[in-house]
């Protein structure tokens, strides 16, 4: 029941063409294939090792009414689909019928389609759709290389149970945990990762005993637990941010004083601190190296799903200072928006 990597992520949206234009024009994704079914239609987008399925239609209205635009399916490849399904059901998941595919419930209304592992998932058309390929057959390239991690927002009293679920169902292990206070909001963060390292979920949840804040607001807007953001790995974040911002991506901002402290804290970043300040990229380090990150604003009406760019200069983990700074930016955005 070994999970290998993420085969694809499926996004449900009311406005498929607008969502696809955002990914293509601003983030450099390429349209790979189209699918039209009785109650929905989908477009497959690719870049590096990332595959996104963008779906709209009357067959997904219930999801959209409850949650707004957001991730509905995180498909994972595994060495034995049947054994993985059975382990997940034993751990508490519900079996799901998904266009003839084997799937199980995950968190909230998000499901996990289980796909047989057969080499790289990049370039393999997601099963269960009537795909008509468009363009060439080569793997689309751009700034984004792969899906570094997926951040999941949960109810405050459930984070431990979900960490245990991913361990028991899919063989994940706890990689990192952190308790952070941002403004009056206190939150737990637990990172779970597959044995192969190909799938990483950052589970975040508000402390139910503390003041409500941005995570509670997300849970309300999203109608419960869901994917808060997708983190895309890039090789060089500074030019990527410049290109994406010029193309229309709206990123969160950081106080100028943050960059004054960077000079004192991280010797290895002094040569690029001015560029970090100009692009608003955040920086931290762990025992292996440096970590550079930046959050976007959500492009969706209910302010649900948003995106992250991340660069790892040797880093393998999640810097605690960056977690606090990133969520402080989200909290400023929430308070400004009222």
Image: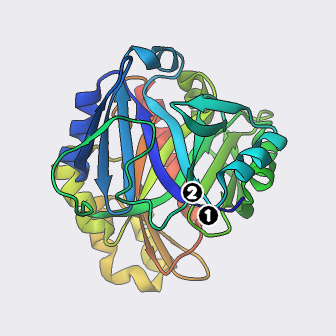
Residue at image location 31% in from the left, 77% down from the top:
272
Q: Position of residue 157 (x, y in %)?
A: 80, 36
- For mark 2, does the 10 Å Cα neighbourhood hold few (<14), some (14 to 19), or many (20 or more) residues? some
Residue 296 visible (yes or no) = no
Q: Where is residue 17 in the image (x, y as percent from the top left)?
A: 23, 29
Disc count in the image? 2
Q: Residue 161, located in which quarter of the rendered image? A: top right
- For mark 1, does the 10 Å Cα neighbourhood hold few (<14), some (14 to 19), or many (20 or more) residues? some
On residue 323, the disc is 2
Residue at image location 32% in from the left, 83% down from the top:
271
Helix or strand or loop: what does disc 2 sit on?
Answer: helix
Helix or strand or loop: what does disc 1 sit on?
Answer: helix
User: Between residues 278 and 304, which one lies in front from this camera angle?
Assistant: 304
Q: Contact (CB < 8 A) between labels 2 and 1? A: yes
Q: Position of residue 308 (x, y in %)?
A: 42, 52
In the rendered image, which residue does mark 1 sit on? 320
Q: Residue 124, located in which quarter of the rendered image? A: bottom left
Q: Residue 98, located in which quarter of the rendered image? A: top right
């Amino acid at each position: 029941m070994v999970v290998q990597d993420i085969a694809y992520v499926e996004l449900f949206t009311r406005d498929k063409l607008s969502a696809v234009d955002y990914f293509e024009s601003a983030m450099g994704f390429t349209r790979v294939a189209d699918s039209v079914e009785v109650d929905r239609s989908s477009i497959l987008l690719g870049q590096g090792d990332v595959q996104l399925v963008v779906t709209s239609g009357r067959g997904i209205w219930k999801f959209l009414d409850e949650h707004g635009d957001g991730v509905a399916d995180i498909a994972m490849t595994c060495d034995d689909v049947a054994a993985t399904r059975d382990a997940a059901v034993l751990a508490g998941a519900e079996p799901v019928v998904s266009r003839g595919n084997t799937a199980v419930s995950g968190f909230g209304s998000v499901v996990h389609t289980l796909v047989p592992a057969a080499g790289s998932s990049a370039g393999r058309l997601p099963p269960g759709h009537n795909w008509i390929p468009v363009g060439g057959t080569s793997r689309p390239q751009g700034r984004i290389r792969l899906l570094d991690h997926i951040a999941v927002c949960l109810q405050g009293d459930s984070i431990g149970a979900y960490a245990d679920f991913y361990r028991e169902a899919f063989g994940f292990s706890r990689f990192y945990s952190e308790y952070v206070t941002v403004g009056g909001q206190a939150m737990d963060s637990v990172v779970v990762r597959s044995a192969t390292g190909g799938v990483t979920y950052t589970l975040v949840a508000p402390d139910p005993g503390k003041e409500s804040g941005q995570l509670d607001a997300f849970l309300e807007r999203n109608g419960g637990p869901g994917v808060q953001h997708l983190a895309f790995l890039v090789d060089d974040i500074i030019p990527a941010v410049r290109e994406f911002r010029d193309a229309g991506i709206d990123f969160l901002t950081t106080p100028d004083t943050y960059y004054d402290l960077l000079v004192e804290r991280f010797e290895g970043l002094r040569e690029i601190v001015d560029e970090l300040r100009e692009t608003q990229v955040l920086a931290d380090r762990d025992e292996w190296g440096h970590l550079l990150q930046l959050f976007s604003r959500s492009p969706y009406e209910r302010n649900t799903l948003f995106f992250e760019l991340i660069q790892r200069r040797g880093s393998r983990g999640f810097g605690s200072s960056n977690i606090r700074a990133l969520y402080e930016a989200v909290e400023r955005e929430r308070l400004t928006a009222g």
